[in-house]
Image (cartoon, helix red, strand yellow):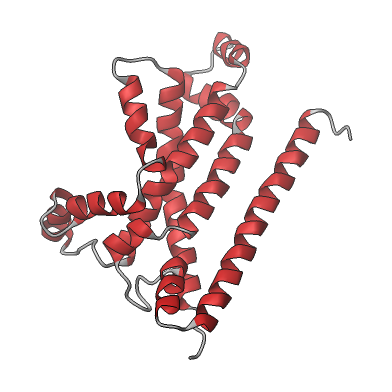
Amino acid sequence: MEFSYVPIVLSLKVAFAAVIIVTCSSIPIAALMAKREFFGKDVVESVITLPLVLPPSVIGFMLLNVFGKNGPLGRLFEQWFHTRIVFTLAGAVIAAAVVAFPLMYQSVKVAIENVDQNLEKAARTLGAGELRVFFTITLPLALNGIVAGLVLAFARSLGEFGATLMIAGNIPGKTQTMPIAIYFANEAGDTGQASILVIIMTIFSFLVIYGLNRWGKGSRRDSRGGGA
């Protein structure tokens, strides 16, 4: 059987879209959780990080009940936008974003918590408002953690399988990402296609982690003044 590059393209589309969603949503939420104390905070944080420990099939089942034809958001999309989420690439993006969000959130939250509060206080005493302090002091100093979370979220999105299969299905050329293509190619006895995709995913994942480690070491050297 001729090798198809479509699952690779779809996986990259899903991963990039999921990372954009996760980045835009995790940074403000992580900042709020890092800077504010409120009743029920532990419960909220437990819910946010729950996808880290839940089996992907459970996450997929929940997403089906939310975005399915009879689900609350599923009906909303049908009525307002005349579109559906289940068995579409949008469903794959949502599944990837849900499972990747806790990784990005945890990394950003820890990075923001480690920012020197004296620098933030100094900026406030000079007349800077909260938004200016956040964008000019907090975010730049938390950049290492944000980048690390972004890379890990991208890698997690790229490798998502269980939840994606349940909500997006296995539709070649439409929702069949690399992990799903590997599984079904192996089931069909097409070990050639499966092996090539496994090699591609392994190399890519290695390069992502290797690049992150190298970037982290370079950032630490820069923070020490460029010493070896």
Residue nearest the observer in this picture, 12 or 47: 47
- Please state, as top left, top right, bottom left or bottom right, where the C terminus lies in the image: top right
Say how many tags the image has. 0
Query: Looking at the image, can residue 154 be seen?
Result: yes
Residue at image coords 25%, 52% = 63
Residue at image coords 64%, 64% = 203
Residue at image coords 61%, 32% = 140
Residue at image coords 28%, 49% = 58
Give the left or right position of residue 20, taking residue 95 as reference.
right
- Asked which quadrant contains residue 170, the reply is bottom left
- Asked which quadrant contains residue 136, the reply is top right
- Relative image position of residue 23 (x, y in whole percent): 46, 43
Task: Give the residue furthest to the top.
Answer: 125
- Relative image position of residue 204 (x, y in whole percent): 61, 63
- Asked which quadrant contains residue 208, the reply is bottom right
Task: Give the residue furthest to the right.
Answer: 228
Up-down relation of residue 27 to residue 115 (above or below): below
Task: Give the residue furthest to the bottom.
Answer: 1
Residue nearest the observer in this picture, 138 or 105: 105
Up-down relation of residue 84 to residue 41 (above or below): below
Query: Looking at the image, can residue 90 be seen?
Result: no
Give the left or right position of residue 2, taking residue 209 as reference.
left
Up-down relation of residue 75 to residue 11 (above or below): above
Give the left or right position of residue 110, taking residue 38 as reference.
right
